[in-house]
Image (cartoon, grey):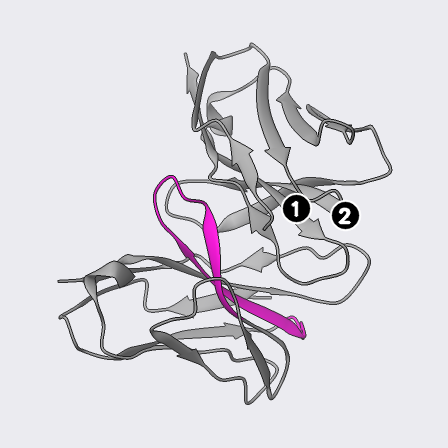
Amino acid sequence: GEDVEQSLFLSVREGDSSVINCTYTDSSSTYLYWYKQEPGAGLQLLTYIFSNMDMKQDQRLTVLLNKKDKHLSLRIADTQTGDSAIYFCAESPSKGQNFVFGPGTRLSVLP
Amino acid sequence: NAGVTQTPKFRILKIGQSMTLQCTQDMNHNYMYWYRQDPGMGLKLIYYSVGAGITDKGEVPNGYNVSRSTTEDFPLRLELAAPSQTSVYFCASSRTGAVNVLTFGAGSRLTVL
């Protein structure tokens, strides 16, 4: 079945860039997503990318998609303490309603 | 708009007890979902619904039941609670469209002792 993998932890210094990586298995995924979960809260959509795009930029966020390697990354520029959270990569296979989530990467931002 | 509202936020159950987690959304979304989140495991889909009167199993449905009598409500029933059901449960909803964006509730933390 489909599978999404991420590293579980990442620590960066405030002001540095963070790069969170994700690999997925379903080549038919139409959209790939990044969700953010702050402590004690539900997940919130951060950004998404359509599978025919290589890159999407949204203010401090840059999403890179390598379809050949099935690799997705999220870069956060000028990382702030408010960016500390768990970041989930997710894929949505074709037009199905089931999302497949990765285990989440816990980002810690050190002052 | 309130979005997706889940109750209760916290609950402790004894083994064998039953309970219902409530979920309601006010966005007129036709799709609704229940996920459970275990540490380091991501989210696993329990059940989902594509509209009132229609429900379907997800990846981990055993020990749970759902119903969808209205567009707004999608309760999750736990029968005969077991320690393996200790988890954080999230309800989510979405509407049909090219991009299927999930809106999540704040979660319900359930402990079975």
- Residue B76 visible at all: no
Residue B5 x/y as whole percent = 47, 67
Assess whether mark 1 and mark 2 are in contact (beta carbons under 8 angstroms): no
Residue type at mark 1 is Glu
Would residue B24 be found to the left or right of residue A22 on screen?
left
Q: Residue at x 81, y 40 (%)?
A: A51
Q: Earlier in the sequence, mark 2 or mark 1?
A: 2
**A8 above or below A44?**
above
Q: Quadrant of the C terminus of chain B?
A: bottom left
**A60 above or below A47?**
above
Residue A25 x/y as whole percent = 65, 40
Would residue A43 be found to the left or right of residue A74 on screen?
left
| Residue indicated by mark 1 | A91
Secondary structure beneath dot 1 equals strand
> Which chain is indicated by disc 1?
A
Q: Residue at x 82, y 57 (%)?
A: B98
A26 and B28: which one is in front? A26
The residue range painted magenta reads B27-47
**A104 above or below A92?**
above
Q: Which label sits on residue A28?
A: 2
Q: Residue A108: which quarter of the image?
A: top left
Q: Residue at x 61, y 82 (%)?
A: B71
Q: Is residue B28 magenta?
A: yes
- Counting every numbered tag in the picture gives 2
Q: Quadrant of the N terminus of chain B?
A: bottom right
- In space, the residues marked 2 and 1 are separated at their CA atoms by 10 Å
Q: Residue at x 43, y 70 (%)?
A: B61
Sort mark 1 into few (<14), some (14-19) or many (20+) by Cα contacts within 10 Å: many
Tags 2 and 1 both on a single chain: yes
Residue B25 x/y as whole percent = 56, 72
Q: Which label sits on residue B75?
A: none
